[in-house]
């Protein structure tokens, strides 16, 4: 798939889909709860659909017949035993969280697989911790061979009993996965977390635990967690808030437009770390305000300038902020973003390469990107099938000197299926082939 985005004048309002991160957690926890849970405003994106498929495979009854309300009858604490398989598709969050929950089954084997990008995402740290806690994660024939990783396809056997384990926290998903699974283990669990990053996502999972009456103790820096065993997840009713990660792209597009551009559906108190984009754009000179409690308005300031930004807790912002840095004047440094290399693609290397192809001066650093901004000429770039890279390159095309042709542009369905229509509603000129 190829998309050509032309320089455009933007103005108007878009509504972002529901939060992918919250929705996947809601599906995961509803699948384990006692009773029936209702999830309102679930996003129609591919990754959340993968989470629903995984919930069914692990024994939950999932009714997605109404697009505005999903109903899930949980497995009453423990996934059903027996042999089954989970296709995580392109969803790394589904892969990690469902893997940990499969370790609660009383018997049988659960086989995990995903698409080509997911097959490159190692679950080694989670697998090592699960072995210490009583379950086994073992690669199958056809899995990539690497001494430094455990990759799909693999099987999960055994049962999490609790105990002590250590895992790497550079990517937050394995830690959140065990935070969800270990309360249902027979015994308590103590986790030592090395290099904890993406802490807003851990806070998000902790918020879900508090909301549903599940207890846990954690060190302020997230280096240590103690989770009592023998707990239960309660059923719930939940309205999914708007997705700040998806909102990053129209917000950055608006920050370099006379606009204004407004993004609706965004709240403040739902724990999403990517709302940190707003102070970053304000620091660059954008004019930002609130139209309503859930609508943010943004437009270009008199002078947009680069800056230095720490992305250790918000690595998903790297593609959008890389484009902002290329459009602003001066230099932009995106630091503490090494974990962005472990996403659907190595986003640090990919964004440096593709922005350079469009005329920017961008280079990788040991922990992120350094960009000399002020000009994007346009031309051809590759989206690598990565939804956030594709959307970032589309924003680049809106403000480049000439059109930007994005190859391998399939993939926005992973998080923002309405993205192209949303851009058009703001006045963007684009063609899809």
Image: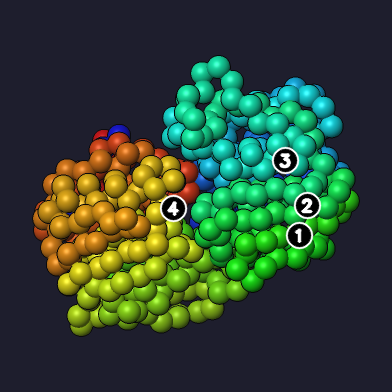
Say which of marks 4 and 1 sits in front.
Answer: 1
Q: Point out residue 124 in the picture as x, y percentages from the top left corner.
A: 57, 38
Disc 4: CA contacts within 10 A as few (<14), some (14-19) or many (>=20): many
* Quadrant of the drawing holding the C terminus: top left
Q: Which residue is mark 1?
A: 226
Disc 2: CA contacts within 10 A as few (<14), some (14-19) or many (>=20): many
Say which of marks 4 and 3 sits in front.
Answer: 3
Kindly indicate whether the residue at mark 3 contacts the one at mark 1 (C-beta within 8 angstroms). Answer: no
Kindly indicate whether the residue at mark 2 contacts the one at mark 1 (C-beta within 8 angstroms). Answer: yes
Q: Earlier in the sequence, mark 1 or mark 2?
A: 2
Q: Earlier in the sequence, mark 4 or mark 2?
A: 2
Closer to us: 139 or 347: 139
Q: Which residue is mark 3?
A: 132
Disc 3: CA contacts within 10 A as few (<14), some (14-19) or many (>=20): some
Closer to us: 250 or 76: 76
Q: CA distance from mark 1 to mark 2?
A: 6 Å
Describe the element under mark 1 as helix, strand or loop.
Answer: strand
Q: Which residue is mark 4?
A: 339
């Amino acid at each position: 798939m190829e998309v050509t985005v032309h320089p455009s004048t933007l103005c108007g309002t878009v509504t972002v889909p529901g939060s992918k991160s919250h929705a996947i957690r809601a599906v995961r926890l509803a699948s384990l709860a006692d009773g029936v849970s209702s999830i309102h405003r679930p996003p129609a994106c591919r990754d959340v659909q993968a989470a629903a498929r995984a919930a069914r495979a692990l024994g939950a009854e999932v009714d997605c017949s109404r697009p505005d309300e999903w109903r899930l009858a949980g497995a009453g604490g423990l996934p059903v035993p027996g042999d089954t398989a989970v296709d995580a598709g392109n969803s790394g969050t589904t892969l990690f969280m469902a893997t940990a929950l499969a370790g609660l089954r009383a018997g049988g084997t659960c086989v995990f697989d995903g698409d080509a990008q997911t097959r490159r995402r190692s679950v080694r740290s989670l697998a090592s911790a699960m072995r210490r806690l009583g379950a086994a994660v073992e690669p199958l024939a056809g899995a990539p061979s690497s001494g430094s990783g455990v990759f799909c396809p693999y099987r999960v056997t055994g049962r999490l009993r609790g105990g002590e384990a250590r895992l790497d926290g550079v990517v937050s998903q394995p830690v959140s996965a065990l935070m969800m699974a270990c309360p249902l283990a027979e015994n308590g669990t103590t986790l030592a977390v090395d290099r904890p990053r993406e802490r807003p996502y851990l806070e998000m999972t902790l918020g879900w635990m508090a909301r549903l009456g599940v207890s846990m103790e954690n060190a302020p820096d997230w280096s240590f967690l103690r989770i009592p065993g023998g707990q239960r997840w309660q059923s719930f009713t939940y309205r999914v808030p708007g997705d700040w990660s998806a909102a990053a792209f129209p917000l950055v597009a608006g920050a370099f437009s006379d606009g204004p551009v407004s993004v609706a559906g965004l709240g403040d108190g739902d724990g999403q770390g990517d709302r940190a984009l707003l102070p970053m754009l304000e620091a660059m000179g954008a004019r930002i305000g609130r139209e309503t409690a859930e609508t943010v308005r943004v437009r270009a300031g008199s002078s947009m300038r680069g800056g230095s930004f720490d992305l250790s807790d918000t690595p998903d912002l790297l593609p959008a902020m890389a484009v902002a840095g290329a459009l602003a004047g001066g230099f932009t440094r995106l630091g503490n973003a090494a974990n962005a290399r472990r996403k659907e693609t190595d986003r640090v290397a990919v964004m440096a390469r593709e922005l350079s192809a469009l005329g920017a001066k961008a280079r990788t650093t040991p922990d992120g990107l350094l960009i000399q901004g002020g000009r994007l000429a346009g031309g051809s770039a590759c989206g690598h099938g990565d939804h956030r890279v594709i959307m970032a390159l589309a924003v680049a095309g809106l403000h480049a000197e000439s059109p930007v042709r994005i190859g391998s542009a399939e993939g926005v369905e992973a998080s923002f299926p309405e993205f192209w229509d949303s851009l058009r509603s703001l006045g963007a000129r684009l063609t899809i082939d």
